[in-house]
Image (cartoon, rainbow, N blue to C red):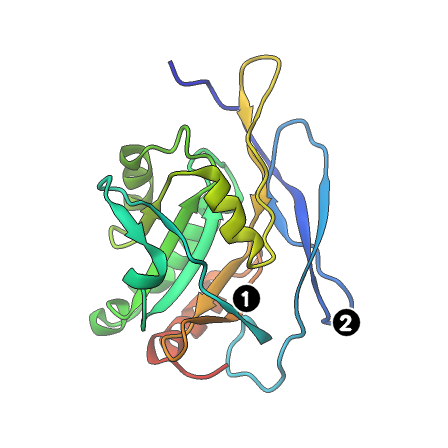
Amino acid sequence: MPLPRTTTRRRLAGTAALALAGCLALSSCGSAAGKTTAGAAVVSMPSSNSPYQGTALSRHFDKPDLVLNDTSGQPFDLRQRTAGRTTLLFFGYTDCPDVCPTTMGDIGVAMQKLPADEQKKIDVVFVSTDPARDTPKVLRTWLDSFNTSFIGLTGDLEKVKAAAKSLGILVEDPIVNKDGTVSSSHGAQVLAFLPSDDKAHVLYLSNSSIDVFSHDLPLLAKGVPA
């Protein structure tokens, strides 16, 4: 039987340093133990005069070289399958009660406001940080509650951790607590990759609103430089 999971709450789990009038701590899903995990990951200096409401990055990150299973159980090469397409990438897990559903829900609502042709230009990819419990079926059911076009990937956790680390995002191993529940912690930022070079140009923190995504998605769909 799969292990039960603990109820989680929002907390800090790995901070990303953005030189934007100081360092900004990024929220994440965390364990019910209530401890705070800190890990410094320098992301980038933000660019000025950007048309985006998200944080435009002066350092543009490569899309991770990551191959996992999609929700149909088939291998999915992230770089290959999303090449030349606007891509929003988020790491999380389906049993998270706060940051993950809020973030995916906000993006889902903003996507629905786009014309159909612009929606088709954007890939929203959710990578599970708890693959032992996030099976393809579980992941598909969860994502469908936000948007049926969202892509879910699950598989080797070490690959997931390495991919996240390349972007300055902390992903920790799920922890089995004494009561048999499982907790998971991960960075909660969303990175947007532009189709022009398949690099991350815009960063969204965990408190980014529907309005922010609604403003930026049309620009991302058009590949507007950050």
The disc placed on residue 21 is 2
SS label for mark 2: loop
Q: Against 56, is 140 above or below?
A: above
Is any part of residue 50 visible from this angle?
Answer: yes
Q: Nearer the viewer, residue 183 or 43?
A: 43
Q: Amino acid under label 2?
A: Ala
Label 1, on which residue? 203
The disc placed on residue 134 is none
Precedes in sequence: disc 2 or disc 1: 2
Residue under the point 67% across and 74% down: 45
Residue under the point 28% across and 61% down: 81
Q: Are marks 2 and 1 in contact (CB under 8 Å)?
A: no
Q: Against 223, is 35 above or below?
A: above
Crowding at label 2, few (<14), some or many (≥20) Cα neighbours within 10 Å?
A: few
The residue most toward the right is 22
Residue under the point 50% across and 40% down: 158
Q: Marks 2/1: CA distance?
A: 16 Å
Q: Where's the N terminus, which quadrant?
A: top left
Q: Is residue 138 left or right of residue 17?
A: left
Q: Position of residue 30 (x, y in %)?
A: 60, 36
Q: Amino acid under label 1?
A: Leu
SS label for mark 1: strand
Q: Position of residue 112 (x, y in %)?
A: 29, 62
Q: Against 111, is 91 above or below?
A: above
Q: Nearer the viewer, residue 46 or 68?
A: 68
Residue under the point 38% across and 65% down: 87
